[in-house]
Image (cartoon, rainbow, N blue to C red):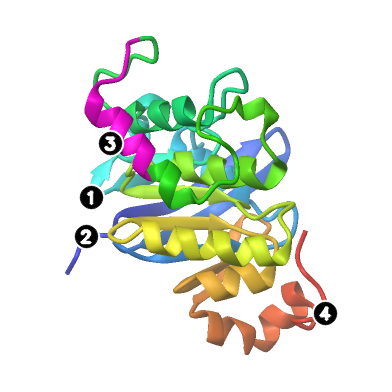
Amino acid sequence: MTTPVLETQALVKQFGSVTAVDQLSLSVPADQRHAIIGPNGSGKTTLFDLVTGAVRPDQGRIQFHGQDITTASEDARAREGIVRSFQLTNLFGGLSVQENLQLAVQATEQTFNPFRLPDTAIVERASEWYGALELDADPQAPVETISHGDRNRLEVGTALATDADLLLLDEPTSGVPPEESRALLRLIEQMTTGQTVLLIEHDMDVALSFADQVTVLDRGSVITQNTPEQIVNDTAVQNAYLRGYGDTTLD
């Protein structure tokens, strides 16, 4: 049996009297696009925080490629290949588009030093990513001057450029017009061959069109995990979360 890329076992996380994650178990195989959906307060963001090491679980275990990483630091997990958009990939407004991509390419190196000059291979790889992203902005333009659409695309691009084994994307199409959202999803699909992607997305059209598997959370627990087609046709899920899929999106 193939070892999952990510496996969580009975995770529990409390903040005071609030149980944000409650006995959450999840298994994600290699090269899968997996969406996490649910209403506000269902535990989606806390799950990402637990997987990346931003917070520690009160109970339970997290395994990455079969290795227990429950107590590993955020930096150690990133070096092992777990990258979250806006974690290693926060954009630096005073740097250029090209420089931000160069930092992303360097970010998961064992000896990462953001202050050293990049070598030729890193510059060339960053230039390749610039071309793949199809940005309107000039590569030498400061990030603080580029359009919202380009910035959103660059944020996703910097996460992709790390070549992580497990890529966690938190609402990558937020604030992006529908046509740009579809183009961004196509880019993610094209550029994540051989990678496993875990996606939080409030827009059902986006989540269900992108994912191979969907996990639905409620009050910090998994209520179902299935294919997008089966999720849409699950009456209990429709009643509890989708509220008549096609009429409403989750916030």
Secondary element at tag 1: loop
Q: Identify the residue at image location x=28%, y=36%.
A: 80
Magenta region, residue range? 116-128
**Which comes sooner in the sequence, label 1 or label 2?**
2
Q: Identify the residue at image location x=49%, y=40%.
A: 50
Structural distance between the alpha carbons of marks 1 and 3: 12 Å
Q: Amino acid at mark 3?
A: Glu
**Whole-percent x and y of residue 27?**
38, 62
Query: Pointer 1: residues within 10 angstroms few (<14), some, or many (20+)?
Result: few
Is any atom of residue 60 visible in this view?
Answer: no
**Whole-percent x and y of residue 112?**
31, 19
The dot on residue 231 is none
Identify the residue position indicated by label 2 in the image.
Answer: 3
Q: Amino acid at mark 4?
A: Asp
Is any atom of residue 16 visible in this view?
Answer: yes
Q: Amino acid at mark 2?
A: Thr
1 and 2 marks in contact (CB < 8 Å): yes
**Which comes sooner in the sequence, label 4 or label 1?**
1
Identify the residue position indicated by label 1 in the image.
Answer: 66
**194 or 7: which is nearer to us?**
194
Identify the residue position indicated by label 3 in the image.
Answer: 80
Secondary element at tag 2: loop
4 and 1 marks in contact (CB < 8 Å): no
Structural distance between the alpha carbons of marks 2 and 4: 39 Å
Q: Amino acid at mark 1?
A: Gly
Identify the residue position indicated by label 4 in the image.
Answer: 247
2 and 4 marks in contact (CB < 8 Å): no
- Residue 122 on the magenta segment: yes
Query: Pointer 3: residues within 10 angstroms few (<14), some, or many (20+)?
Result: some
**161 or 164: which is nearer to us?**
161
